[in-house]
Image (cartoon, rainbow, N blue to C red):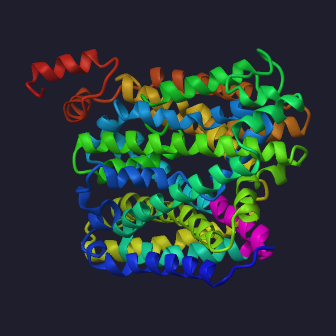
Amino acid sequence: MVQFNFLDWFWLTTYILLMIGCGLLFYRLGKRSESDFFLAGRGLPWWLPGMSVYATHTATDTPIWVSGVIYKYGMSGIWYTFFSAWCAVSAFVSTRIFRRSLAYTQAEWQGLRFSGLSSELLRGWVAGWQVFMNMFILGWVGIAMGKVCNYAFGWPTWVGLIFFSTICAFYVLTAGYWGVVMADFQQGVIAFIVILIVSVNGIIVAGGPHAILSKLQDMGQAWRANPFHVSGIWTGDFPLAWFLTMLVIALLGGFGMGTSIDWYAEAQRIQSSKTVRDASYCIWGGTLLVLTRNALWAAAILGFFVMYPNLSPAEAEMGWFRLGFDYLPHGILGFFFAGIVAIHLSTISTHLNLGALYLTRDIYHHYLNPEASEKTLVWVARIATFILLIGSFFYGLMMKEITKWLIFALWIMAAGVWLPNVLQVVWWRFNGWGYLSSWMANLLFSWLVVWILPHYGIIPNLPDYLQFWLLMGLGALIYVPMTFLTKPEPMEHLMKYYAMSRPIGWWGPVARQAKARGLI
């Protein structure tokens, strides 16, 4: 169990007061309007939302997940985090298209891309889904913090889950997105310093790079240092087929919106940037920091493996945290834990504000009270933030294994809507009914393929990559016929959308009509 001295407590206390101060400092800006509370008035230079992209994706659960996959697969496990690369592609494609739309949320964008009843149903569905998903994300990030506090201090997991999320809720409730993005900048800097210190120190403790490689050779585990190691074409823990699946998802995914659950947090940062160029730079810069962070973690976990080669999956998940708690001296130890709190709060704050955005803008403002004043909307946003916080506690207490839930949420539950997310951007004929049916089909098929049918022995437990492709195929059997059996979106609507967003891909009929009308 970790024991703090005065300097350790000083670092932690100072940091918590700094975050609370953010809420008080930016309260005046956050209370002015719905735009300020959720998008900081759309006036941020690229480096602020860019650091927020990085900080948001550096959560308490992230080193747990990365530790788990690197410990199991060696350096090739870093490709499990390669989905981040879709952001780099999106910086040049879907980021620009989305920023031109001026939609607050992905749900609101559906109303611009599609029309009629399908558009309204989609907006309500996507908004409701995002309220649920943000609670879900908050729960797994929160319980990850609970696990860390349990390991370090022996606290029950619910204490770490509730205590730090509640602190975070203070500055999100008061200052909204202004508080989130300004705190994220500080948190991102602190987190990167801590990751660098702990990872480099961990490599040194393990004997340095040459000693780690030598020990791996002696253990017959030299393959772990090869990031391109695969266990076979179709078989083993890390087959070539799974590697290629991840590359397809990452590289082509950037052409779509909503490629994974991460897009929705990126979308808020995109719309808070002051220009289209700033939006692109923020996604590119944030992604570069994420990939650098992953490399530091991966190298450190190789060192952890040679020191502790026979751990269970649950023990291995705590590898990076153990390098910090077990090997840093007092004084630095408190700074390390302050960095963990920074990592935690940056993600909690994002998803509290993001979930409240969908609840306020897309449900309350759009469906219940379109004439609401700005003052009313800000108060509804604060109430929505509180609802998200309480809901996250319930989800967090239900989760046991972080990695399993992350794989399911990031990959499998996105499988059936992965291609539709691309099609809605690049193909004019894809309509709202096709997209809506893809969502419905994927929710049903994902639970059947991953959980229900294997449980009853109807189908075997399939590898992740086979689950992904099977779900893609099953979904296509639903949304492709639905698209062609229903009418295309009205040409007038599509022309207005095309003139505003300038999408790429197969938009020839719409582009010709828009040019003939003088819209472009």
Count of numbered tags? 0
Q: Position of residue 356 (x, y in %)?
A: 45, 65
Residue 152 highlighted magenta (yes or no): yes
Magenta stretch: dominant secondary structure: helix
What is the x, y in percent for residue 401?
78, 54
Highlighted range, magenta: 139-158
Which of these two is toward me, 93 or 85?
85
Residue 274, position as x, y percentages in the image: 23, 51
Q: Residue at x 42, y 47 (%)?
A: 266
Residue drawn 49% across the image and 55% down it: 56
In this rendering, would 13 be left or right of 432?
A: right
The residue sitting at the bottom extreme is 6
Residue found farthest to the left:
518
Taking the image as drawn, is residue 458 in sight?
Answer: no
- Reply above or below: 471 against 17: above
* Residue 56 sits inside the magenta stretch: no
Q: Is residue 297 left or right of residue 156?
A: left
Image-based side of 506 in relation to 127, left or right = left
- Residue at the image position 47 percent from the left and 45 percent from the top: 289
Residue closer to the observer: 498 or 55: 55
Residue 277: image x %, image y %?
Answer: 25, 40
Q: Is residue 257 visible?
A: yes
Q: Quadrant of residue 70?
A: top right
Of the 4 image quadrants, the one containing the C terminus is: top left
In the image shown, does 57 or 290 lie closer to the viewer?
290
Quarter occupied by the N terminus: bottom right
> Residue at 76% across / 70% down in the picture?
152
Relative vertical location of residue 171 with respect to residue 475 in this rendering, above or below: below
